[in-house]
Amino acid sequence: MQMIKQKVGARVRELRNQKGLSQEKLALAADIDRTYIASVESGKRNISIVNLEKLIIALDTSFAEFFEGM
């Protein structure tokens, strides 16, 4: 299970960086606490599907694009 948390976190970080967003700006756009995003990106948090959807919307992507290549 640890591997999927790290993969999802790395993908969030990758897309956030591609969009030129700080963790704080992404947190505001997704209505999620910045420390939560930091823990997701570091693979420490088992993100809920609801919060994953919020991040995907804030990153202006789709579930299909998010999981592409994983």
Image (cartoon, grey):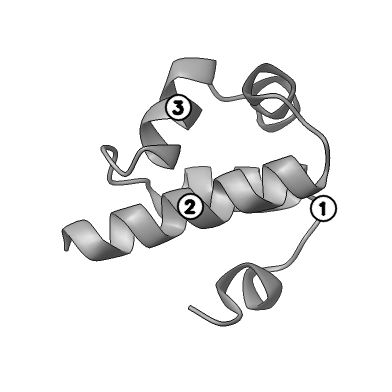
Mark 2 to mark 3 CA distance (whole Å):
11 Å
Mark 2 to mark 1 CA distance (whole Å):
17 Å
The secondary structure type at the circle numbered 3 is helix
| Res 70 label | none
Q: Residue at x 55, y 57 (%)?
A: 11
Q: Residue 7 versus residue 60: which sits nearer the camera?
A: 7
Q: Which residue is mark 2?
A: 10
Q: Residue at x 66, y 17 (%)?
A: 24
Instruction: Count neighbours of disc 1 (C-alpha within 10 A) and say few if under 14, some if 14 to 19, many if 20 or more.
Output: few
| Res 60 label | 1
What residue type is disc 3 on? Ala
Q: Residue at x 83, y 44 (%)?
A: 19
Q: Which residue is mark 3?
A: 38
Tell me: 35 left or right of 32.
left
Res 44 → quadrant? top left
| 24 up-or-down from 9: above or below | above
| 60 up-or-down from 65: above or below | above
Q: Nearer the viewer, mark 3 or mark 1?
A: 3
The secondary structure type at the circle numbered 2 is helix
